[in-house]
Image (cartoon, rainbow, N blue to C red):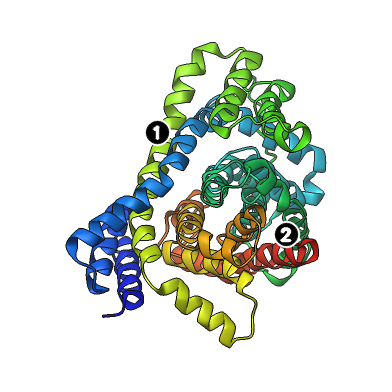
Amino acid sequence: MDSTIGALIGLLLAIFLIIKKVSPAYSLILGALVGGLAGGFSLEEVVLSMVDGVKDVSSAVLRILTAGVLSGVLIKTGAAMTISNAIIRFFGEKRVYLALAFSTMLLCAVGVFIDVAVITVAPVALSIGRRLGVPTPQLLLVMIGGGKCGNIISPNPNTIIAAENFGADLSSVMFANLIPALIGLLFTVFVITRFFSVKPRRVHTDEEELSNDNSLPSLWSSLVAPVVTIFLLALRPLFGFTVDPLIALPIGGLCGIVCMKQWKNTLPSIEFGLQKMSVIAVLLIGTGTIAGVIKDSTLKDYILGLLEHMSMGKDMIAPISGILMSAATASTTAGATLASASFADTILAVGVSSVWGAAMVNAGSTVLDHLPHGSFFHATGGVCDLTFKERLKLIPYETLIGATLTFFTTIIYWICR
């Protein structure tokens, strides 16, 4: 059997098992094993491909684990909530969509996971929604849209893994998607919200205020961690002095702890971040196994042939691979991992630079990362108390937002190449 068919069988099996609530990591590992054997590889060859795939993501796994320090500090100390509350107060409730979208965008941009960013902002969003009578699905949609925009310019696992597999500088990959992210934010706030309209399920008229917990850190101290991190990452493109994310992200988090004077929260924050990152690290190991099988299959050759048949440039494999792999895994991180690990060499060989290859794969991975066989779909729907049917209705609009990000990243690449 052709190795392409085998790889597709492995992907479909992994998706089926994930939908059936089998552990995603084990689902991907089993999918890789079955896909390799179905594609005509011997058992020894399949295992070697799987191990090589894991080796390809091992350095990114290390960086992602250390990124847990920054993420844990922002969430556990309340800094993320302080930042989101300040943004919403600044924009005001009359611009609630812009406030919520920008809040989640900023939280993701400074290193908070998109699902955690939505969960962080959601209580404030629901409070405003009840007071103003804004439908909950609409509130969730703008938070997700803002999160997607922030995700492509962040030191989050998806950006780290894409930059790592392409051998690109992380800060350069983040900066490459800045304009598409801003366009995506405006598209979410001023276009998507006009297309998507539902009746509110409930309206609460009692006066409610934004969270004003005195235990939360001040705004200036909350901003120290992300500002230090971004400054350290920006040293390479600005001054040619490289500070690896492995160092920059933990230092930023620890500086935040010091400035917020929350030394007692140091270990809990690190443990919390490690716990969150460990889940992703394990998922990446599973993703690496199936990426190894795909990389050794002829799937990329078929995709190149399809692009040629459609009279599309071979450089389009970067965004398309991100889209396809995010659909297969329903995850930005896993999608970026699969696409970059499987197709980076091919993308670079057709003349795409490492920075733009990583940027386009990263943007493409936001197009279908919200499908129901992934955890993001359920986590975001659950925090806003949406039914499965209500959450399902958001998918076309989320896809439009991701497609907009991918389209403008590709357009800017064509202009700059």
Instruction: Give percent across and percent down for residue 76.
Output: 52, 27
Q: Measuring 65% from the left and 50% from the top, which residue is drawn there?
A: 130
Q: Residue furthest left?
A: 43
Q: Measuring 58% from the left and 83% from the top, which residue is drawn there?
A: 308
Q: Amino acid at mark 2?
A: Gly
Q: Secondary structure at mark 1?
A: helix
Residue 215 visible from this viewpoint? no
Q: Secondary structure at mark 2?
A: helix
Toward which corner of the image does residue 185 lie, by quadrant?
bottom right
Instruction: Give percent across and percent down for residue 202.
Output: 60, 57
Q: Amino acid at mark 1?
A: Gln
Of residues 155 and 171, the one nearer the viewer is 171
From this view, report whether residue 104 is shown above or below residue 276: below
Toward which corner of the image does residue 252 lie, by quadrant?
top right
Residue 27 visible from this viewpoint? yes
Instruction: Give percent across and percent down for residue 272.
Output: 44, 29
Q: Measuring 42% from the left and 54% from the top, which residue is drawn there?
A: 375
* Residue 13 in the figure: left or right of residue 379: left
Q: Measuring 67% from the left and 41% from the top, which residue is drawn there?
A: 171
First in residue order: circle 2 vs circle 1: 2
For residue 184, the mark is: 2
* Residue 265 in the figure: left or right of residue 47: right
Quickly name the residue at label 1: 275
- Disc 2 residue crowd, few under 14, some 14–19, many 20+, Cα 10 Å: many
From this view, report whether residue 331 is shown above or below residue 117: below
